[in-house]
Image: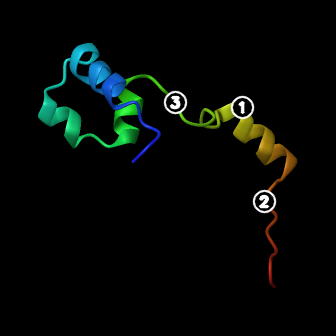
Amino acid sequence: MTGFDWPGLMRAGLRGLHLTPREFWQLTPAELALMLGQSSGPAPMGRAQLDALLQAYPDKSEVNE
């Protein structure tokens, strides 16, 4: 597998986060990135953004009588 700086990741996990080797190797890359403070992607939508979307695109209900 290429693209990973294994020595750097191991230093960050073992020295920086004080993980044991077993704990380090049990993590997924996503879990390690989260623990190291790296985010992948935009922040989740906040309430203000949701309210703006609801205002712009209100639900429409059709009543069948």
Alpha-carbon span between mark 2 and mark 3: 33 Å
> Quarter-wise, where is residue 25 in the image?
top left
The residue where tag 3 is placed is: 39
Q: Which residue is mark 1?
A: 48
Q: Is residue 63 above or below residue 16?
A: below
Residue that numbered label 2 is attached to: 59
Task: Say what secondary structure mark 3 lies in.
Answer: loop
Q: Residue drawn at (44%, 22%), measured in percent from left and top? A: 37
Query: What amino acid type should be assigned to the residue bearing mark 1?
Result: Ala
Pointer 2 or 3: first along the chain:
3
Q: Residue furthest bottom?
A: 65
- Nearer to us of marks 2 and 3 is 3
- Percent x, y of residue 11: 28, 19
Furthest residue to the top? 16
Of residue 56 and residue 21, the one placed in the foreground of this image is 21
- Which kind of residue does numbered mark 2 sit on? Asp
Element on which disc 2 rests: loop
- Is disc 2 in contact with disc 1, using a CB cutoff of under 8 Å? no
- Counting other residues with Cα less than 10 Å from the Cα at mark 1, is it few (<14), some (14-19), or many (20 or more)? few
Name the side, left or right, on which 38 lies relative to 32: right
Badge 2: how crowded within 10 Å, few (<14), some, or many (20+)?
Answer: few
- Residue type at the position of mark 3: Ser
Residue 28 locus on image (x, y percent): 32, 43
| Residue in view at x 34 percent, y 27 percent | 9
